[in-house]
Amino acid sequence: MQIATNNNAKYMWIDGLKVKLEGEKNILDVIRKTGINLPTFCYHSSLSTYGACRMCVVEDERGSVMAACSTLPRDGMSIRTNTKKLLKHRRMIMELLLANHCRDCTTCAENKDCELRALASRLGITSVRFDDCRPVRPVDASSPSIIRDPGKCILCGDCVRVCAEVQGMGVLDFAHRGADIVVTPAFHKPISETNCVSCGQCSAVCPTAALTIKDETQLVWDALMDPDKRVVCQMAPAVRVALGEEFGLEAGSLVTGRTFAALNRMGFDFVYDTSLSADLTVVEEANEFTKRLEDGGPFPMFTSCCPAWVKFVEEKHPDLLDNISTCKSPMQMLGAVSRKYWEKPKFKDKETIMVAVMPCTAKKAEAARAEFIHNGKRDVDIVITTQELACMIKEAGIDLPNLPPESPDMPFGLASGSGLLFGVTGGVTEAVIRKCVGEKTSEALQSISYCGVRGLEGIKEAVVELGDKELRIAVVHGLANADALIKQMKAGQIYYDFVEVMACPGGCIVGAGQPVMKNMEIREKRAESIYDADGIAQLKYSDENPQVSAIYEDIRPKDIHHLLHVEYPQKERDA
Amino acid sequence: MKMSSLAAFQKRQMECAKTLKLEHKKILVCGGTGCVAGGSLDIFAAFQERIKAGGYTFVDVELEKEEEPHVAVKKSGCHGFCEMGPLVRIEPYGILYVKVKPEDVDEIFETTIIKGKPVKRLLYQFEGKSHTTEKDIPFYKKQRREVLEHCGLIDAESIAEYIGIGGYSAFTKALFQMSSDEVINEVVLSKLRGRGGGGFPTGKKWQQVAGQAEKERYVVCNGDEGDPGAFMDRSVMEGDPHRMLEGMLIAAVAVRAQNGFIYVRAEYPLAVTRLKNAIKQAEEWGLLGDNILGSDFSFKIHINQGAGAFVCGEGSALTASIEGDRGMPRVKPPRTVEQGLFSKPTILNNVETFANLPKIIQNGADWFRSMGTPGSPGTKAFALTGNVNNTGLIEVPMGTNLKEIIYDIGGGIKDGKKFKAVQIGGPSGGCLCLDHEHLDLPLDFDSLKAAGAMIGSGGLVVMDEDTCMVEVARFFMSFTQRESCGKCVPCREGTLRMLKILEKITQGKGTLEDLDMLQELAETITDTALCGLGKTASLPVVSTLKYFRDEYLAHVVDKKCPTKVCKALTALVIDPEKCKGCTKCARNCPVGAISGTVKEPHVIDQAKCIKCGACRDACSFNAIGEE
Amino acid sequence: MPKKDAYPEVDQILQSYGSDQSSVISILQDVQKYYRYLPADVLTYVAEKLGLSEAKIYSVATFYDNFSLEPKGKYLIKVCDGTACHVRKSGPILATLRKELGLSDQKHTTDDMEFTVDIVSCLGACGLAPVLTVNDKVYPAMTPEKTTALLNELKGDK
């Protein structure tokens, strides 16, 4: 028998198993391909390799020990992932980490999601032979979005790298060295005194509870239990494609109806869909863009839905504030519009509390901005994340996967597919193009979706013909990508008419408030789910949404601007 | 000033050599850090005054203007014999004066410069014999000074003098008579191994850089000599800076690098001054800069000062520091030769390695291989320190054994004490002891590795019988722990735990399990730490556990420190034979632990005693001692 | 937020290095030479001028031993505790300094801002062990008695 061999193919041996090399950048990726889940704390395929936790050690034939995350695969290489030596080292490293770590697991915010706890259990660590000699380090709860507990930090540096590499901010960094090393903002300042944009990606990558999302569920419970309060809730598009993961459903499961049902069971008086105000945003933003085309700028027009992005511009490029669309984000639009609705004299019997369920931590900070507080009252009172909602549903004992679906309430419960697209990177752009192009055929819809706005690349470009004009469009996610784009723009190397920016890598579906992602495929499944939701939506165009028209009819023309638009003060602008 | 062709260089070289010959008498005052601290600059000034007052012509730097034979007074680099500083050497007689004071200047001038006779009282005395010249002194006899040949002989601040004695001709040979490949090949053939610690073949490193596709390349000199107890590199940078620049230039020619960086630790201000001065001179004379000597080769050298972090001696930490970041080692690959400084191919060698190059190019690889051992050819400079009579800077052929160094060159152990151990290779090296065959151990890369130590950068710290090896291990661990960058878990947390255990043991609270735990921690740290410094951090503990286990057991089991170094394990007791009952000790005791009636022997209550030693200091009769 | 041109000396330092990010360590060394320590607002100012994040410059400044974010005394005494000095008994010298000046391993600078006592790993003057430096001047072969005498001399120098 003849077996054809490909002479160019390269192989290595993992625990005696022959594995083909397919361009993996390190042997960790090769090992994981063989079904062995080598432990790591500091390795994220989307970030630079740090190589500090040393959990992924493997042994070669000569008995040398190396970290898999930072070893290049070589043809003919042979390594073992579990030897007597390696098990001993991994346990010792784990024990060393635990020796310096808080062990109050039962009451910890990270609890079931804690990678340190999970790994300790996996490695069979039942006791720690070293004394606890940790210095007491105070918890920083100054940020509206993020809680930092340095006592639970294992110094893997994931947050430092995500903040600098993905978001271009560098709010957190290492300070001091050796046993005194800590991760901290400059000068040990509280986060609230830094230029943190509250994107929360640091907490999303943190393996422990050193960085967590501010938990505001108690405020919601208090409101729900108060008979004098009318509690109104809105839910963002991205929540429905991720919440199910917290309840054991497959990633990307669409649980829209079941979530509204759960909200109703928990006692919310009215449940609304933020996708509706996304439709409103599309109409307003398209109008604004058309007007800018007539007035000649300023270009590019940047989207304004992402509060972390808006804060980023304020902090880093205040000169571009005028380029940001004046449209409020969908959450703030719905907050303002529904607040106006419930302020009608006939509803004065109860105080209305506005709750928003968001995939996002920056929304907590956005809702607290002075621009959205009128007469001492916030348009949105409480923002909770998808994760917080999951906790509340669990606490209430509601079996989400098996609930019969329910619909949101009118008049703020009907959305088009365009509105739903807001949950994913490129979605805002796609919705706005749909509105601007105006040609409402299936062919046009398809050609828009293939024009380059879909996909998870960091920077996407598209050219769209509008009448006799060619519009140059960019879709960016990750603030570091945005920063790079702006620098090129300022240098005159590139030009765009319209730029969508979302801070989180993938858009709102990977917001820091979403369930913890165990791998990157989950991101794709969530994105597909959003596109599926758009696919089955009977309404495709924001301006065809009858509820949008109803809202315009209900609002006095002179109120439209202040209800739907905002101007951010240019505090940082040079005099 | 600027030379723009090979011919111009050769002409200048002849002029410089001629001028040097006019100096029929030379006074070389040691300008190394050690002698400067001892006041050598005042001696230098005094000689200048004396020459002026006597109406003699003298020159400082501007040699070429002199036409008449004259007396020269110079600040030279370190002579190496730091123990005996400040040192003054008089040429052409080769007389070496030790422990010179400014008030000796007149006598030296009258007797030696004018009459040509030695001042006997200033000569080095050893075992009743006085030694007139350096060559006679046992400290120098067994040395072979190649890298350090100019240290102490020439003016460290003069490019003219360096060129006058043949300097920079190896560079011009490499530039004009050899191809890049030939230069690299010569270094490969020489089998020169990096003097910074690892002993990696220098030529191989260069080949790897030369093989990179990227053409923007760097030559980096590691002058971050952080190992406590090592100062060889400092002496070269201070004493013969041009030789190091020449070495870097040769490396740059070999791989066609455009820029060089010297990373000097901040603790060496004099080295920085001398290097800056040397770079400025080389630029002015056209040996650094664009189109050097009219060729198409351009090279610039920049100086970066460290800011106090031992870990910056590690290659990737050093380049991170030059780039303006925290000096934290990064994972490899990519290696420094592929993506080093500013992510470009980089030759990174240490000072001594660069200083070896001019003579290799000049005399050839065969000459170099004729010294040392086949596996480790050449010489090695060591800083001989600790409890040895002759501390200082020495250079010996690779493979010289410890006994020769400690007893012949070092003059044996100070105060007639017994030798106990020698620590080699810095904080991550090992402690070797007498009880084994180690005194006959040849010092070269491979022999040391086999013995569980490493050559490191070349610090040799000799320890006598009064040294507690457990305390020494604790000392080294506290150093590595303090200097850990904190990045990887095993080094950051592991060294901290090892230190805590060693502290426990020196305080008499250790257990036998602690010794096992030390071993276990050491294994994990060695196998899994990210960088070389982490991997070797536990070597002092492992080697002392191996060679001095008895001392550990004495601390742990008997709760005794055999050398009485560990305070917590010693008791202060009053000798009743000597005690006169004067009550002075009781009055000085801060915790009231001493009792006794007047004129009767007193007693210390060990339960109350805090071992501060105030009683012992107070006692006029030497009645209080440690047990 | 610091005003523009609030630190002309710092501007001069920045200019001499061409406001190059990779020169940040040299820049901080010069800043420290001028102020004798690194004031927080100056660090922020330098970070902004170099286009570095504030956390990054703080991160670099706290990594290296030679940088101090606290003001140092008029006399900066560095006691070498390298191996050679350690085996030639540098410990009692440090103890003497701390005792005489009322300092400890926590408190490094006297209240009157006259003296700071730091430990350094090795000054590279091992042949003269044990050594200390006062404002970079090396004092060789120290003993506790010589240390006390030196302190008295410095105190009289006020």
Image (spheres, grey):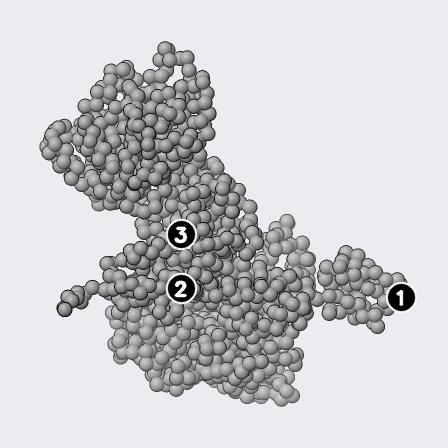
The verdict on a common chain for dots 3 and 1 is no
Question: Which residue is at the front of the view, A242 or A369?
Answer: A242
Identify residue for label 3: A41
How many C-alpha atoms fall within 10 Å of the one at disc 1: few (<14), some, or many (≥20)? few
Amino acid type of the residue that numbered disc 2 sits on in the rendered structure: Thr
Q: Chain of mark 3?
A: A
Any part of residue B351 in sight: no
In the structure shown, which secondary structural element does the residue marked by tag 1 occupy? loop
The verdict on a common chain for dots 1 and 2 is no
**Left/right of residue B334 with respect to residue B588 in the rendered view:** left
Question: Which residue is at the front of the view, A538 or A362?
Answer: A538
Identify residue for label 1: B599
Dots 2 and 3: beta carbons under 8 Å? Answer: no
Please identify, in this view, whether the residue under mark 2 or under mark 3 is nearer the observer: 2
Please identify, in this view, whether the residue under mark 3 or under mark 1 is nearer the observer: 3
Relative to A468, is B307 above or below? below
Amino acid type of the residue that numbered disc 3 sits on in the rendered structure: Phe
Any part of residue A416 in sight: yes
The answer for how far apart the CA atoms under marks 2 and 3 are is: 20 Å
Query: What residue appears at the point 22 percent right and 35 percent down from the top-left corner?
Result: A532
Q: Chain of mark 1?
A: B
The answer for how far apart the CA atoms under marks 1 and 2 are is: 71 Å
Question: Which residue is at the front of the view, B248 or B405?
Answer: B405
In the structure shown, which secondary structural element does the residue marked by tag 2 occupy? loop
Dots 1 and 2: beta carbons under 8 Å? Answer: no
Question: Which residue is at the front of the view, B391 or B5?
Answer: B391
The answer for how far apart the CA atoms under marks 3 and 1 are is: 70 Å
User: Which of the labelled discs sits on residue A83, or is there none?
Assistant: 2
Q: Chain of mark 2?
A: A
Residue A155: % across, % down = 45, 51
